[in-house]
Amino acid sequence: MQKEKNIIIFVMQMTERMALDIKSYAKKTGKKYRVMLLWDSRVKGDDKKKGYDILVSCDFGKPHKIAEALMPYQEELLAITCRGDNQINHFRDVLPHVPYLRTPTTESLRWAIDKYEMRRRFRLYDPKITPLFTKVTDNTRKERERVIAKLGLPLIVKPANLGASLLVAICYHEEELEKTLSTIFRKIRKAYELDGRVEEPKVIAEQYMEGDMYSIDSYVDSRGVIYHCPLVRVTTGKQIGHDDFFGYKQTTPSALNEKSVKKARRVTETAIRALGLRSTSAHTELMKIDDDWKVIEVGPRLGGFRDILYGLSCDIEHTMNDIFIRIPRKPVIPKKCKGFATAIKWYSDKEGKILEMKGIKKIEALKSFHSIQVNKKVGDRAVFARHGGRSIFNVFLYNKTRSDLLADIRRLEKLVKIKVESRNGKTKQVSKKK
């Protein structure tokens, strides 16, 4: 008797929210799905949380162990996905052992998780969509002069394989470049280790692009047909006065006109095809410079927070669409959005020990409040993203009207006060967002 194919594999990362999304869809449609978390036994961590139906753990460094672990389930596998950018290499390790599932190629994934290789593919496919770039090998004067001669100033320096704006910095002159490279080369191995990266650390520099930042999540089927979600407007820490380049505020849908949206989608499709991605979701970050669009990067995964943002604003079942594109089945994207949603990542204006956190509980009283994730507590250190730090908290807001949402964002920015103690022991009152 043929077994029913109903097992969905999540490689290395799965949250209870993802599992609930699947169970909610199954209950609504009368379907039956089982969720498997496939884990590399060499990795220690607390990601093995409740929500899955099956936990399979094996040594990903030994291919026959992966094959052995999956053998009992082969006839029941429906789809395989990976949600974490830092887990894509683990995903690549598994793909040869699920030959009858629709997946991206291992080579396309390699291009998509290495910003240097990614830019080389963009340049090969269409040089107009990518800024000038180069690999940085060391922090010698000769290398800095070469980089500046090729790219000009200002320029962006970043690790090739880290996300969330970790260790990303803007350099306006050679002295700043020297200091930035010193910090990156000193911290990069530890940052890769903390992020679960198995790649050899690599640093790139690229031409600084001054414009408005956007992102978009898309679904790519096995034939290369691409379905787009709404664009998300990204406000960076730099734009609100921080000496940092993290994504402070992400809002969807954007206020762009139809012509601009079409241009953004065309550039996104060019980038996705340059990487040869198929049977996957894709998260693309873009820069709008006047009427032109450039690609910052493409990730072979769903964007961070996008399941919440798209679900709140447009009733898009992002987790299920990510699975549908791999079954394959056409994703469901409503034509109109019902409201506006925002995610805010809050970083301190200063680095140091956190002495006081005020106003965070009051956020919950805002009419637009949806949920909050508090990542730091009093006594922890506030560290900039460019130095490898994580946000103090992430908050999610939703409102039917854009004006009411903007009003609550302004109220939130006035409510929160964080006090930190600098290294010399002096207390610093962190200013509220402007």
Image (spheres, rainbow, N blue to C red):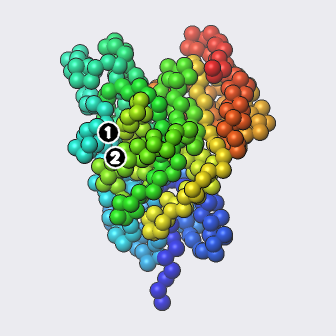
Answer left or right for 356 relative to 13. right
| Depicted 199 relative to depicted 391: above or below | below
Element carrying mark 1: helix
Residue at 59%, 50% (x, y): give it: 310
User: Does residue 184 appear left or right of residue 51 in this picture?
Assistant: left
Q: Residue furthest right?
A: 365
Q: Tell me, for residue 271, which label it has, or none.
A: 2
For image coordinates 45% across by 57% down, the residue present is: 227
Estimate the x, y position of residue 134 in percent, counting from the top left.
25, 30
**Of pointers 2 and 1, the one earlier in the residue sequence:** 1
Query: Few, some or many C-alpha atoms within 10 Å of disc 2 (few <14, some 14-19, many ≥20)?
Result: many
Give the answer, above or below, for where 68 lies relative to 284.
below
The picture places residue 203, in percent across and down from the top left corner, at 31, 31
- Asked if labels 1 and 2 touch by Cβ distance under 8 angstroms, the answer is yes
The kind of residue tagged 1 is: Ile
**Secondary element at image label 2:** helix
Task: Give the residue number, with chain letter if any, for mark 1.
Answer: 129
Q: Residue furthest bottom?
A: 1
As measured in the structure, the alpha-carbon distance from the residue carrying label 2 to the one carrying label 1 is 8 Å
Q: Residue at x 63, y 42 (%)?
A: 341
Query: Closest to the observer: 427 or 306?
Result: 306
Asked where in the image residue 392 lies, by quadrant, the reply is top right
Query: What count of labels does the image hold?
Result: 2
